[in-house]
């Protein structure tokens, strides 16, 4: 079988593996670098997905907080506004207390 492989240009390497081409130099670290690069790529891809999810969450939370701010500002305006009910003094109970009736 090795004679047939030699005829088509495939020779057994010094490590005993069949399939290495003698005229193409393959550094030993190239496969490890590819694996490392691939793992780096996958980690960065996961990190990007995580950042995308965080970005969507922050955008949604920002919108909710803006709505909440508007409601709080309206509540402050309502509290600061002139009261619509006018009280009428009816009777003094003592020095510090009195009975007041409303107009509505």
Image: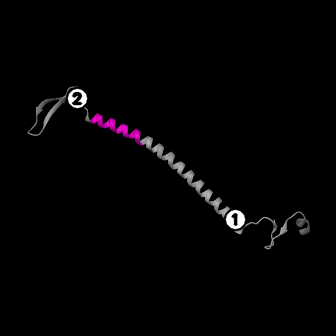
In this rendering, position of residue 22 left or right of residue 104: right
In this rendering, position of residue 97 left or right of residue 84: left
In magenta, the rendered stretch is 65-79
In this rendering, position of residue 15 left or right of residue 91: right
Checking the image for residue 30, the label placed there is: 1
Who's the residue at 47% across and 44% down the image?
59
Q: Between label 2 and label 1, give the one nearer the viewer.
A: 1
Residue 9 falls within the magenta-colored stretch = no
Residue under pointer 2 = 85
Quadrant in the rendering for residue 70: top left
Q: Is residue 69 above or below residue 12?
A: above
Question: Helix, strand or loop at disc 2?
Answer: loop
Residue 72 falls within the magenta-colored stretch = yes
What colour scheme was applied to this rendering of the protein?
A: one colour
Residue 96 percent across, percent down from the top left: 11, 40
Q: Is residue 75 above or below residue 19?
A: above
In this rendering, position of residue 34 left or right of residue 47: right
Quadrant holding the C terminus? top left
Measure the alpha-carbon separation of dots 2 and 1: 84 Å
Q: Earlier in the sequence, mark 2 or mark 1?
A: 1
Quadrant holding the N terminus? bottom right
């Amino acid at each position: 079988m090795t004679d047939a492989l030699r005829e088509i240009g495939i020779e057994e390497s010094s490590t005993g593996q069949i399939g290495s081409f003698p005229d193409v130099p393959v550094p030993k670290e190239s496969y490890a670098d590819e694996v490392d690069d691939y793992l780096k790529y996958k980690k960065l891809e996961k990190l990007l997905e995580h950042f995308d999810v965080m970005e969507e969450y922050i955008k949604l939370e920002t919108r909710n907080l803006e709505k909440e701010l508007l409601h709080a500002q309206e509540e402050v305006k309502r509290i600061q506004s002139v009261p619509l009910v006018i009280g009428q003094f009816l009777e003094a109970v003592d020095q510090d207390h009195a009975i007041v009736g409303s107009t509505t």
